[in-house]
Image (cartoon, rainbow, N blue to C red):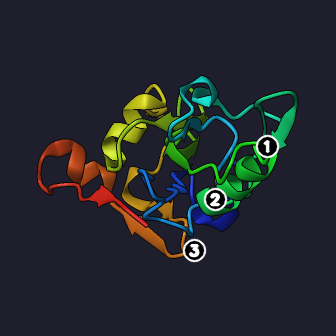
Amino acid sequence: MRRDLGLAFILPCLILTFCPVGFGSTAEEYKIRPGDTLSIFVLGHEGYNLTIPVRADGKISYFYGDLQAAGLTVGELSEKVRERLRFLKNPEVLISVQPVGNEIFVFGAVSVPNRYILRSERISALKALAMAGGYDKEKADLESALIIKSNGIMERVDLRKALSGEEVMAYLSS
C-alpha cells in the first residue's frame, strides 16, 4: 500500500457554515445554494407566495419564468423577485432560506468513501467514520487520521483512543 503523506486513513471534513436565514435576511452574507429550500412571501399578495427548492442549475421557477438564485444573498434575490413583480405597487418581499445542510467528505480506508450531507451543525469524527461504514482494519492508520476543515486548518487526531474510550472526541467545526 502506498503511503502518500504517510497516511493510510484520511478524514477530511469540509464543514460549511450552517446558516439558517430567516425573514428579513439576518445573514446577508449567506449565499443561496442548489438544494436550499426558499419560502418567498409577498406581503398582501398571498397568490405570489411560494416554497420551492433551488434546482441543481441554481435556478428557481417563479411567476412566468426562471430566476437565478444560487450564488445570491437573500437581499439580492428579494430584489430580483421585486423586479419580477414590478406590476404590483411596491411589493414587499420576504424570503426565508432553509439551507441544504452541511457537507463533509470522508475518504481513505473506509467502507464507503463519499460526500455526506448533514442535517445538523455538529458531528464527531467517530460519527463521520460510522457514516462511512467504518474503517478497514488492515489498512486504516487510526492513530494518524487527518481532518481538514473548511477554513483550511488541518488537525491530526487519534481515533484509536476515541474508539477505546480513552479520549472524548471533540466535535468537528470550522
Q: Is residue 2 visible?
A: no
Q: Quadrant of residue 72?
A: bottom right
Q: First in sequence: mark 1 or mark 3?
A: 1
Classify 10 Å Cα crowding around label 3: few (below 14), some (14-19), many (20 and above): few
- Quadrant where the C terminus is found in the figure: bottom left
Q: Residue placed at 63% from the left, 59% from the top?
A: 31
Q: Position of residue 7 (x, y in %)?
A: 57, 59
Disc 2, SS: loop
Q: First in sequence: mark 2 or mark 3?
A: 2
Cα–Cα span, label 2 and label 3: 20 Å
What residue type is disc 1 on? Phe
Residue at the right extreme, as displayed: 65
What residue type is disc 3 on? Gly
Residue matched to label 1? 87
Nearest the viewer among 105 and 100 is 100
The disc placed on residue 31 is 2
Residue matched to label 3? 152
Q: Position of residue 41 (x, y in %)?
A: 53, 38
Of circles 2 and 1, the one toward us is 1
Residue at the left extreme, as displayed: 166
Q: First in sequence: mark 2 or mark 1?
A: 2
Classify 10 Å Cα crowding around label 1: few (below 14), some (14-19), many (20 and above): few
Of circles 2 and 3, the one toward us is 2
Nearest the viewer among 139 and 125 is 125
Cα–Cα span, label 1 and label 3: 47 Å
